[in-house]
Amino acid sequence: MRACKELGISTVAAYSETDCDAIYLDFADERICIGPGSSDRSYLNIPSIISAAEIADVEAIHPGYGFLSEVSRFAEVCRSCNIEFIGPSADAMSMMGDKVRAREIAVQAGAPVVPGSQGAVDSGEDAVKIAHKVGYPVLVKAGMGGGGRGMRVAHNDMSLLKCFAVAESEAQAAFGDKAVYIEKYVSGARHVEIQLLGDHHGNVIHLGDRDCSLQRRHQKLIEEAPCPALSNDVREELGTAAINIARAVNYYGAGTVEFLVDPSGSFYFIEMNCRIQVEHPVTEMVTGVDILREQLRIASGERLSLRQDDVKTQGVAIECRINAEDPLTFQPTPGTISRYYVPGGPGVRVDSHAYCGCVISPQYDSLVAKLIVHRRNRREAIACMQRALEEYVIEGIKTTIPLYLDIFGHSAFLSGRVDTKFVESVLDNGGFASGKAELSETEKDKDKPT
Ligand code: MV4
């Protein structure tokens, strides 16, 4: 809506009954209720959304970053109703939504993938053969999963046979498709992703990288741009690999290609997200590009407003996802915000729906705010984040702010030496310290509806 206003485009806000007091409704030109709080009957209900869009006579729908944003059928229905879906083609979405297919596309595009199965794995026997070839530990991943959902780790033949059967039936239940595939477990890796933009004229550029290694149960907590641990060579190779993968599916719109980067600098494609992501602001801050504005331009058939050579990054940006959760147990803490003060000053950006008196409903995601800082270098960005976290007043609900103050005070974070195990070690939670318990759980992705 902010990008629309700046471009002179009027907006219609869709909302569920639960969100009738949401602040974004005050900023739209029109508002229209699409159903009750239960997302199945509102934000995930394609007929409700299309009916609302037709009543309001909209030209386009922005799907946001949860709910239907990666559902190719939704993109297809929108376009068949002569409403532009602000995102990639339904074909690109369905190809990348199938993670087995996405791996094959990456291989064809010449990008490195994690050693593992070719295609889906049909039997426990085949799974064991692949594991012997690539070596334990291995991960069994759901073909229609992604973001760590339905992912299990196996350390030997026995546990693999068990994981395989459980993963297949879980995949069937969760995604309606039992296909699973196998990857070698890459240890000590960082999660690095490349932000892409493509237009309808065949131009694809990247806006550099983000490090999203700080996660808990596949929920990202802190994201940073650029990644603090990449050489210029690896950085450039990642950008090129990401662009080649996008070109292979004639990608247009904003998208993200995710990689694992191991301590030696070897990198492997893991998956592609066909939507704008929660953490896009860190890229906006370091590149100065309004990614939402680009999405709108692309959807209206215009060319990208910049070429690859025009993309320059400046300084360091860090984002903390402030959640309405207990900072130790991560249990959601819905409720009413009774006192609220937003940090400000140089280098601080807060993207949030929160205000004093607002109700954080247990029905949806617990994300309350994204606190983003942008400074000339990492040391100054961390100092800025620390003082902004201290300045932020949110009372009436518990938030994850105390966890972030702990993390930013930690020497491993300050030196940029963090990997997949870091959050658990800060929490000093014995059950997760090995990383095994963590990886064997099936959790929903933060970007997905709950
Ligand atoms: C992996 C991996 C190790 N080896 N794949 C995928 C989804 C994302 N949320 C985490 N994923 C991982 N995939 C292979 N073959 C380790 C992770 C992983 C992780 C990666 C980077 C940073 C933090 C992480 C936390 C848990 C798991």
Image (tube, rainbow, N blue to C red):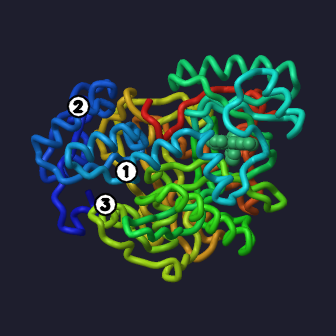
At x 44%, y 53%, the residue is: 276
- Estimate the spatial distance between the alpha carbons at disc 2 and disc 3, rounded to whole Å: 22 Å
Image: 438 above or below 58:
above
- First in sequence: mark 2 vs mark 3: 2
Give yes or no for contact between labels 2 and 3 (Cβ–Cβ under 8 Å): no
The secondary element bearing badge 3 is classed as helix
In-image side of 162 versus 292 (left or right) = right
| Residue 299 marker | 3
Question: Three-letter amino acid code at disc 3?
Answer: Ala
Q: Up-down: is 168 above or below 241?
A: above
- Label 2 neighbourhood size at 10 Å, few (<14), some (14-19), many (20+)? some
The tag earlier along the polypeptide, 1 or 3, is 3
Q: Is residue 25 left or right of residue 275?
A: left
Q: Amino acid at mark 1?
A: Ser
Q: Residue at x 33, y 46 (%)?
A: 63
**Residue 387, located in which quarter of the rendered image?**
bottom right
Look at label 2 and name its amino acid: Pro
Which label was assigned to residue 352? 1
| Any part of residue 440 in sight | yes
The residue shown at (64%, 53%) is 106
- Say whether residue 430 is left or right of residue 135: left
- The residue singled out by tag 2 in the image is 47
- Tell me the distance, in whole angstroms, between the alpha carbons under discs 1 and 3: 25 Å
CB of mark 2 near ligand 1 (< 8 Å):
no
Q: Position of residue 365 (x, y in %)?
A: 43, 35
Going 87% across and 35% down the picture, which residue do you hit?
136
Return the residue found at the far front. 108
For the N terminus, which image quadrant? Answer: bottom left
Whether residue 90 is situated above or below residue 311 in the rendered picture = above
Depth order, front residue of 218/70 = 70
